[in-house]
Amino acid sequence: MRIHYFQHVPYETPANIFKWAKERNITMSGTHLYKNEPFPDFSSFDMLLIMGGPMGVYDEDKYPFLKKEKIFIENSIKLGKKVLGICLGAQLIAEVMGSKIYRCENKEIGWFPVFKTDEAENSKYFYDFSEKIEVFHWHGDTFDLPKGTKHIFYSEGCKNQAFESEDGKVLGLQFHFEVDEDTVKTWIKEGEDEIKSSGKYIQSPEDMLADKQLFENLEKHLYILMDRFTGI
């Protein structure tokens, strides 16, 4: 299994996915789109991982690489590659699959639970996950579910938190399974203005970093998902 990732800004990395891949002896390569690095050959990877970022899918004028990225994602799906999108990555997948992306009624920043849907019982990856999982969020946009996908998770603040294609090859997560403590500390510095805005689902930096057990649980869920999604 060869994984290639798209990174949109310096501070939103695969984080614990790097750790998982190293332990599994899985090769990872990446394109740092903010550096205008070239896109890879489709023959060079088996799975495409699309990371998050502070921009929106509609910010093509400000971030011209988004146009080429969307075409690349669409072609990866058509070629039958496994494609996993996280936060912005999930929104990009949803858009190329024909769905709308728009501002969520509630901005979610911090630890908030997601809940399994009935459809999740038939998921290839989440069938035995708990009905309620504490996960990390940092987003203001959301998406409509793409046609032909299962609705897997929802939260109180945002209805569509995850989707899975019928064949299991495409997966979109609005929330973050991949973050570690250092990642969140960096995001707090980078997103200082966002945290200052008021909202029911915006935590303080202190609350985001208070419980180390949350990070440990998150990593366990990530490992299970990545093992299953990559077929290990």
Image (cartoon, rainbow, N blue to C red):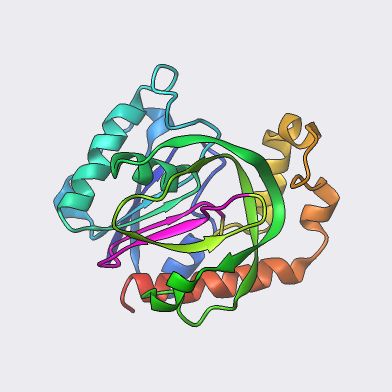
Quarter of the view holding residue 122: bottom left
Nearer to me, 212 or 78 = 78
Quarter of the image with the C terminus is bottom left
Is 92 or 50 nearer to us in this picture?
Answer: 92
Q: Residue at x 35, y 58 (%)?
A: 28
Which corner quadrant holds the N terminus?
bottom left
Q: Is residue 135 above or below residue 98?
A: below
Where residue 43 sits: x, y (%)?
14, 53
Of residues 159 and 181, the one drawn nearer to the viewer in this rendering:
159
Residue at (46%, 43%) from the top-left corner? 143
Q: Residue at x 56, y 54 (%)?
A: 175
- 174 magenta-colored: yes
- Find the magenta span and give its range: 158-175
Q: Nearer the viewer, residue 10 or 134?
A: 134
Based on the picture, tell me whether residue 142 belongs to the magenta stretch: no
Residue at 45%, 36% (x, y): give it: 101
Residue at the far front in the pictured view: 118
Residue 22 seen in the current view: no
Say left or right for 58 vs 77.
right
- Could you tell me residue 64's position as x and y percent? 36, 22
